[in-house]
Amino acid sequence: MPPPTQPLAVSKPNLLTGFLVHKPQWALTLAVLIILGAFITKPLNFDDPLFVWAARQIQLHPADPYGFNVNWYDSAAPMWKVTDNPPLACYYLAAGAGIFGWSEIALHAHYLLPALAVMLGAYRLARRFCSRPMLAAAITFFTPAFMVSSNTLMCDVLMLAFWVWSLIFWIEGIEHKDQRRLAGAALLMTLAIFTKYSGLCLLPLAAAWSLLGPRRPRDLIWLLVPVMLVAAYEAVTGALYEQGLLTVACEASSRYRNTLHCQPSESLLMTLAFSGGCLAPIFFFTPILWTPRKLLFGTVAVLVIIANLYYGTPIVGNIALRTGASATSLAIQFVLFSAGGVALLVLSVADILKRRDADAFRLGFWLWGTFVFTAFFNWCVNARSILPMSIPLGILIARRLESNAAKGTESGKVSIAIPLALSAALALWVAMSDFILAKAVRTSAEEVLIKCQGGKGTLWFGGHWGFQYYMQALGALPVDRNTTLVKAGDYYAMPGNNANLTDFISLDDATRLETVSVHNPCWLATHNQAVGAGFYSSIFGPLPFVFGRVPSEAVDIFVINRVQKDTKPASR
């Protein structure tokens, strides 16, 4: 005890805590700029090149975004037949590149703005649903789905930015009877649809949100605005190209699903696994959301259900047989990820049963609607389709913690900080692994060029994604199964971890010059068919990411010895 004559010491508030409490929007802004800014040197990979090529076309011909040919599926085809996305994200890239240039750093820096808009929107929306909006926004931020998607040049995060702000304007417009906000919501919904066609899901979601609140059916008239504008878009693109682009995308999605022969039970299980992995905070927060008794009972029940579904649908076994991956390791991870997906759905149902209010049903429609769309309507299961669920995930966890506190079982700061820190660590690990993969792909293309520089023949290559982008930038040519004519002395590079590969040559007609091998990230893969990781498409694996040893990024280089004129390349 200090002497009575001295004033008692008053502890100073923690500066970080005070900043988070009093300046949450600035805290989120700094988090986006610092954490996501660390990945702005990421090379282009997967579908990034399609968006960049279309953006270059837009700078030359703004009214004709897809009026060029691209060799993406082993032969040249019109871009409007290749891409399955509307062009607004490409216009956004073209605008940014017109100011800052076409470097990877400039393009990724430009895409920090949509990521920031998502975070600020998640915080503002969470303020309406829970008393811990900062926690809800932080959980959204530290999901692998958001962390990785924010480091691509694709349309998903931009669409989510329009998505969340359209819902903010919509619900505020309904509650305040503000026609201007409803009009703004209708415009943002239209922009979401013109960014990615899955933005159409906003229309039934907004209608459900209206019917669950103050019932004013006349407000639903505003939903006719995006409907009419999408109809106009379909007519304009139908006149510009041979067919309306929305129709093209729908037909492509249906064709892919039929080609994959994916059973509904398989798609359901993979969507559960992708949900649990892409929204991993649910796994770390679950122990503090439920009492030990409920947690034990729920864990046993979930594992029994998943085990029965799993053995009735041998997804992992088929993957293991095809790739040589460890069936045991894949099965364990698949069950754990699926359990996380079930826990997420249960959390939503529990929130509805506990509160029985409009907000609980609104969050439930959002989460369950996205889940159903991904499982049964999207062309495949992937992390980008799961992404919209990241915002209701954070809000539902925050609401559950509130319910527990109301019953006298409030979680302390440490017990909340630990799962949040684990979520952040995993999300950053997944993002860094995807970053290293993209660098490995670019490096492999550069090394192929070095190996073939001394020869006089033409360098051809198979595959696409980032490998195609950098090979073409270095002067190599993609093979076209319809038109390509090779000659003796030419080179052919074939990447292993890629898609749409062509058996362009026979081993009897070529000599393997060398295999370029570049190390991939250790112990975690976001895309590698050999280990069952398919973050960007479940075609390549039943899990969004996989723990374990990751094979190197390998490219086989062949020298053509002779050409058999009667032999045509065969796709595989």
Image (cartoon, rainbow, N blue to C red):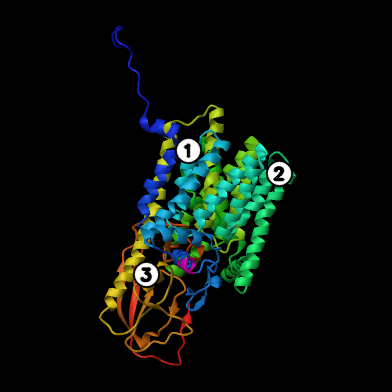
Q: Earlier in the sequence, mark 1 or mark 2?
A: 1
> Dot 1 corresponds to which residue?
135
Helix, strand or loop status at disc 2: helix
Circle 1: residue type? Leu
Residue that mark 3 sits on: 470
Secondary structure, mark 3, is: helix
Q: Is residue 534 visible?
A: no
- First in sequence, mark 2 or 3: give its number: 2
Find residue 331 and report its horizontal and vertical position in percent: 47, 57
* Residue at mark 1 to residue at mark 3: CA–CA distance: 40 Å
Asked if 380 appears above or below 565 in the picture, the reply is above
Does 380 appear above or below 21?
below
Q: Are marks 1 and 2 in contact (CB under 8 Å)?
A: no
Q: Earlier in the sequence, mark 1 or mark 3?
A: 1
Q: Check if residue 166 falls in the magenta segment.
A: no
* Side of 236 where 485 appears, left or right: left
